Amino acid sequence: MARSYAQQLNISMTGTLGVLLRGKQSGYVDAIAPLLDKLNALNFRLASATRAAVLKCATE
């Protein structure tokens, strides 16, 4: 609901994976893969193809 409302207001959004990628690009995060593993343990829904794409973008 919040996402659709933000879209109606033309507010840009960044999801969890985008935040992790920006963190790595900025040097705040050394590696994304261990964080994705922790999210997986918390039942964060992430398709394997999406995980692979994120890791590729992060050069991991």
Image (cartoon, helix red, strand yellow):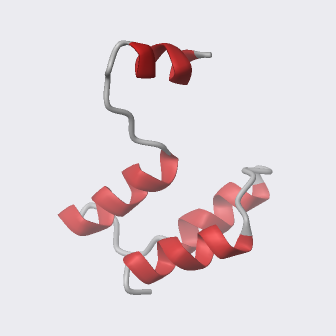
Place residue 58 in its image quadrant: bottom left
| Quadrant position of residue 60 | bottom left
Residue 45 sits above or below residue 11 on the image: below
Task: Work out whether residue 30 or residue 13 is closer to the camera in this orientation and state it.
Answer: 13
Seen at 72% across and 73% down, the residue is 48
Residue 34, image x, y percentages: 57, 72
Q: Where is the N terminus found, in terms of image quarters?
A: top right
Name the residue rendered at 61%, 68% in the picture: 50
Question: Considering only vertical position in the picture, is 53 above or below 46?
Answer: below
The residue shown at (19%, 62%) is: 26
Total residue callouts:
0
Q: Residue furthest bottom?
A: 60
Q: Position of residue 54 (x, y in %)?
A: 49, 71
57 on left or right of 28 = right
| Left or right for 10, reference 15 | left
6 and 34: which one is in front? 6
Q: Which residue sits at x=75%, y=52%?
A: 45
Expressed as whole percent of the image width and height from the top left, the position of residue 41 reads 77, 59
Quadrant for residue 37, please give it. bottom right
Against 26, is 58 above or below?
Answer: below
Q: Is 13 or 25 nearer to us in this picture?
A: 13
Q: Residue at the far left: name it.
A: 26
